[in-house]
Image (cartoon, grey):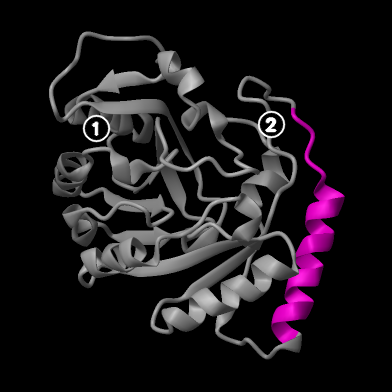
Amino acid sequence: MGGISSVTNEETLRIAEIFGPTIQGEGALIGVPTVFVRTGGCDYRCSWCDSLHAVDSAYRDTWTPMTPEAVMARIEALSGGQPLMVSLSGGNPAIQPLGGLIRMGQGKGYRFALETQGSVARRWFRDLDMLVLSPKPPSSGMVVDWDIFAQCVAAANGAPSVLKIVVFDEVDYQWAREVAGRYPDLPVYLQPGNHTPPPPDDDDAVVDQEGVDARMLWLVDRVIGDRWFGAKVLPQLHVMLWGNKRGV
């Protein structure tokens, strides 16, 4: 799917990879059969990014320009024409013109979830079946613009929305509690951070599963000890099953 095509219209999507069906590995839709559409390009550069092949412009020659029709055709081919959940991820998929794809797919019975850090608000967020807002904690090295983040929450305009926050340490944990306090009406999902992102072309990267498991146990203890009973603590199921391999 890599390479450059001559598609240049304003609805062109930069696609890093499309794969599945497999299961969603994290957050509110964990375990749900899903086709993943990973877009290329991001306005963030997190210190622990695990998808540099979809973020770093050094890999832009591997991103394929595709029309929404072509993306939808690939989704249908992978799913055998049987509607299921489609996860739009990245990079930051919010920087792509995805509204047409979402409407097209929903017209065929597919559902769409999108995960974004909340740095770009789009009117088509309201068309989503789920908006996953994943603001990046201090360990990422990024700083959240809370005014823009609020615009993203408002843009959902009633579409189901959740918070998903990665936690690496105590600073991240306390930050996550503050974020949840800003948006008490949004369900919050916490997951332990994975310190071992793979090189973009390495399907055999080793996961420090022992370290991730220890972080998970610590996170559970912190949540229960603080009686933060509104939070849901979940692992990255796909990392447990397949490590840091791409395309699963």
Q: Residue at x 49, y 83 (%)?
A: 181
Give the image location of residue 89, x and y in percent: 42, 43
Q: Residue at x 46, y 49 (%)?
A: 33
Q: Nearer the viewer, residue 3 or 172?
A: 172
Going by the picture, which residue comes out furthest to the bottom? 227
Residue type (three-letter) at the residue carrying disc 2: Pro
State whether residue 112 is above or below residue 178.
above
- Tell me where the magenta segment starts and ends, as one range: 205-224
Q: Which residue is mark 2?
A: 198
Q: Is residue 18 visible?
A: yes
> Left or right: where does residue 182 sit relative to residue 138?
left
Which of labels 1 and 2 is toward the front?
Answer: 2
> Left or right: where does residue 192 sit relative to residue 76?
right
> Left or right: where does residue 39 sit relative to residue 58?
left
Task: State which quarter of the image contains the C terminus.
Answer: top right
Q: Residue at x 48, y 60 (%)?
A: 135
Q: How many marks?
A: 2
Circles 1 and 2, Cβ within 8 Å, touching? The answer is no
Circle 1 SS class: helix
Q: Magenta region, mostly helix, strand or loop? A: helix
Q: Is 213 included in the stretch rendered in magenta?
A: yes
